[in-house]
Image (tube, rainbow, N blue to C red):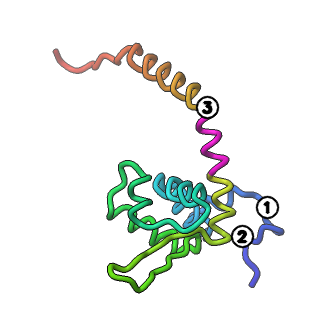
Amino acid sequence: MDTVFDVAKSPNLVESYLQRCPARDTLAVLADKWVMLVLGVLRADGGPVRFNELRRRLDGITQKMLTRTLRDLERNGLVRRAVYPTVPPRVEYSLTAMGEELGQITHAMGQWALRNADEISSARTEFDERQAAEPVPVSSGSR
């Protein structure tokens, strides 16, 4: 099937930002902060991780959010879920080959964030100070 999203025919990545592009849905999944962090934990451990271990390692995530995030990742083929018939059932998560590949990208993004954290913090402070110092327009309404 001929499509406008064929990379060989349309190498412009900006087209992936168009509403009708299937890649946009994938980018939306990856934009979630918990997705990045879950992938990071799974990649760092290099093997299966149990649900409760993930929850302990991801400070601030709720059980509901972790469940939703893992389901989204599994649905998108990035995470593999294995259930073992024990009492209680043991559930483990690991990265698929595609998840491993994405994990390399998210790891690089995490390294970039660490290298630039001080500069970003300074930029935020400078911006906030400029915003606080800018004059507020005077309304021309009645006094």
Task: Name the residue rendered at 38%, 17% in the picture.
Answer: 132
Observer-nearest of 52 and 95: 52
For the residues bearing labels 3 and 2, Cβ distance under 8 angstroms: no
Mark toward the start of the polypeptide (2 vs 1): 2
Q: Nearer the viewer, mark 1 or mark 3?
A: 3
Label 2, label 1: how far apart the Cα atoms are: 8 Å
Expressed as whole percent of the image width and height from the top left, the position of residue 18 reads 61, 62
Q: How many marks?
A: 3
Task: Please state, as top left, top right, bottom left or bottom right, where the C terminus lies in the image.
Answer: top left
Observer-nearest of 78 and 89: 89
Residue 8 lies in quadrant: bottom right
Mark toward the start of the polypeptide (1 vs 3): 1
Residue highlighted by disc 1: 11
Residue highlighted by disc 3: 116
Mark toward the start of the polypeptide (3 vs 2): 2
Q: How would you rate the neighbour count of disc 3 (Cα within 10 Å): few for under 14, some for 14-19, many for 20 or more?
A: few
Observer-nearest of 129 and 110: 110
In the image, what residue type sits under mark 2? Phe
Expressed as whole percent of the image width and height from the top left, the position of residue 25 reads 55, 67
Residue 133 lies in quadrant: top left
Q: How would you rate the neighbour count of disc 1 (Cα within 10 Å): few for under 14, some for 14-19, many for 20 or more?
A: few
Q: Looking at the picture, does residue 136 appear above or below residue 27?
A: above
Segment colored magenta: 107-116
In the image, what residue type sits under mark 3? Asn
Task: Name the residue rendered at 74%, 85% in the picture.
Answer: 1
Task: Name the residue rendered at 44%, 60% in the picture.
Answer: 54
Q: Looking at the picture, does residue 77 appear above or below residue 39?
A: below
Q: How would you rate the neighbour count of disc 2 (Cα within 10 Å): few for under 14, some for 14-19, many for 20 or more?
A: some
Reply yes or no: does residue 114 show up in magenta: yes
Task: Name the residue rendered at 42%, 60% in the picture.
Answer: 53
Mark identifier at residue 5 = 2
